[in-house]
Image (cartoon, rainbow, N blue to C red):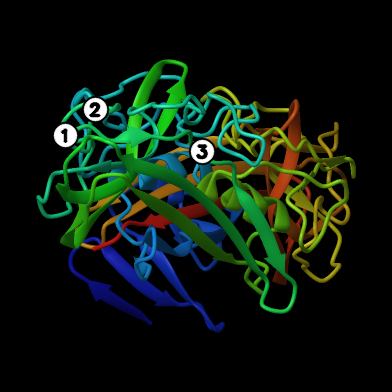
Amino acid sequence: MGLSIGKDIIVNNDGRENLNIEWSKFDRQSNVLHGHRIDNPKIKVVKIGLQTPEVPTGLITLKQDSKKPVEFEMKSFTRNYYNRLTSQMMGLNGIALGTTGGAGYLNVRTTSGSWDTEILHYYSPRISAGYAETQSSYEWSTALGTTISGILIGSSSSVFSFEDYALTGYTHGFASGNIYHSANNPFFVSYNAGTRVWTSSHSRFFANCSGATISNINELGIVKINSSPSYYTLEERSVLEAPITLLNRVILRVTYLRNYTFPNTVDWTRNAYNAWLSNSCLLGNPGPTFGAGLRSGKVTSGSVIAVASAHFVLMKDNASGYVEGANLSNCGILVGIGNDVESLEDYALATKKAHSASFTYGANTRLSTNYTSGSKTYLTQLSRQVNNVSAGSTVITEIGLVVYGYIDNNQYFLLARKVLASPVTLENSESLQVIYEISSVYPA
């Protein structure tokens, strides 16, 4: 039975628990019916969906000398922030860039108002001690008095917009109307094994030494440095319900506290969640081993990469990441014949099928990248075909997604592993096309 939805999409019941989608007009390469390509029944198809994890929750605390602290939820992230995370997790570096930017594009907008259209762009914390516990000038400046990066305050009371890219900041100093900016303080990071929650806290002090009351502090935010090419991007902006009045010779402390809950699900591996933690909270990756409460990465060879001064960067550039050419079986979409139960700690397929004369890997390809404005969702499709050219049959029981990532050096990291509920048997001359659909949902 088929249920027609409009002219071009037919949903077919394949007799199993899930519905099977046939595209009757669009994208013939992915035209699938009952687990086979319609244009070539010898090519079987498995499609796996992944959604990027949720962004961290958190609190912002404002404290003035003896006054009672003011707390409110940290939720006003900008498009810059979401574009950076989407670019990393979905391997979209250098893809979906426009000459301007905005909805449907992955450009970031600098605090000067210009759009970055760099083709090879990390969109991620660079490899450094920066913006982590040990900190450096890579992600925000540690210099005393900097007014261009880190935690900043401003005077604009305009309503928050997802498209915000700058604050109306204050001049550093002691003159009339100026505010003294201390250095950005290092991070404090902790992990609660019971709740599986990471907490990172960082703060900055601002002092009014101008000789008069300043009564128009209306906004605050986080501005990150991008080091190559060099510019500054606003990633969070909070507009206060009521302006802060800062008396002369009074200090204001702004603290950002982020909570990230490690899930119990095994859709992504710990490697993937550690990378998300590192990129979303901008933390380093100290180890020295691998597991709960640690932020290291474990490569497919079994080695643990634990560099306290480095971030977990997934997409080095558009030539690597998930993309690897034909006849190679170290990166991208991989298949195996193992059936060990999926685990958050998985770092490699249980029994990978390597490229050989009897079992070949095609190139990793990207079928599509689309943005749906109604649901505010980016969706990318990664595809790879493997071919059984042996005299006998091969039973594929597991599928994985491996990234060519970077902590201290270029390494291979397993980010997702799926044990198939219904293994796929490939007879001689049969092929399997694996499609990963990775989606990222932006806030309403």
Q: Which tag is nearer the camera, tag 1 or tag 3?
A: 1
What residue do we see at 53% from left, 83% from top?
A: 15
Between 362 and 428, which is closer to the camera in this rendering? 362
Res 328 visible: no
Mark 1 or mark 3: which comes first in sequence? Answer: 3
Local packing at callout 2 (Cα closer than 10 Å; few below 14, some 14-19, many 20+) is some
Using the image, tell me which numbered label, if any, was put on residue 171: 2
Quarter holding the N terminus? bottom left
1 or 2: mark nearer the eye: 1
* Residue 166 spot, x, y in % from top left: 22, 36
Q: Is residue 223 above or below residue 287?
A: above
Residue at (25, 29) in percent of width and height: 111
Q: Would you call the spot at circle 1 few (<14 residues within 10 Å), some (14-19), or many (20 or more)?
A: some
| Helix, strand or loop for disc 2 | loop
Amino acid found under the numbered disc labelled 1: Gly
The residue that mark 3 highlights is 91
Quadrant in the picture for residue 16: bottom right
Q: Which of 442 and 355 lies nearest the eye of the viewer? A: 442
Of badges 3 and 2, nearer the viewer stands 2
Label 1 and label 3: CA atoms lie apart by 45 Å
Q: Are marks 1 and 3 in contact (CB under 8 Å)?
A: no
**Residue 225 seen in the figure:** yes
Tell me whether circle 1 and circle 2 mark residues in contact (CB < 8 Å). yes
- Whole-percent x and y of residue 432? 65, 51
Q: Position of residue 169 (x, y in %)?
A: 22, 35
**Amino acid at circle 3:** Gly
Q: Earlier in the sequence, mark 3 or mark 2?
A: 3
Rendered image: mark on residue 177: 1
- Mark 1 and mark 2: span between their CA atoms? 8 Å
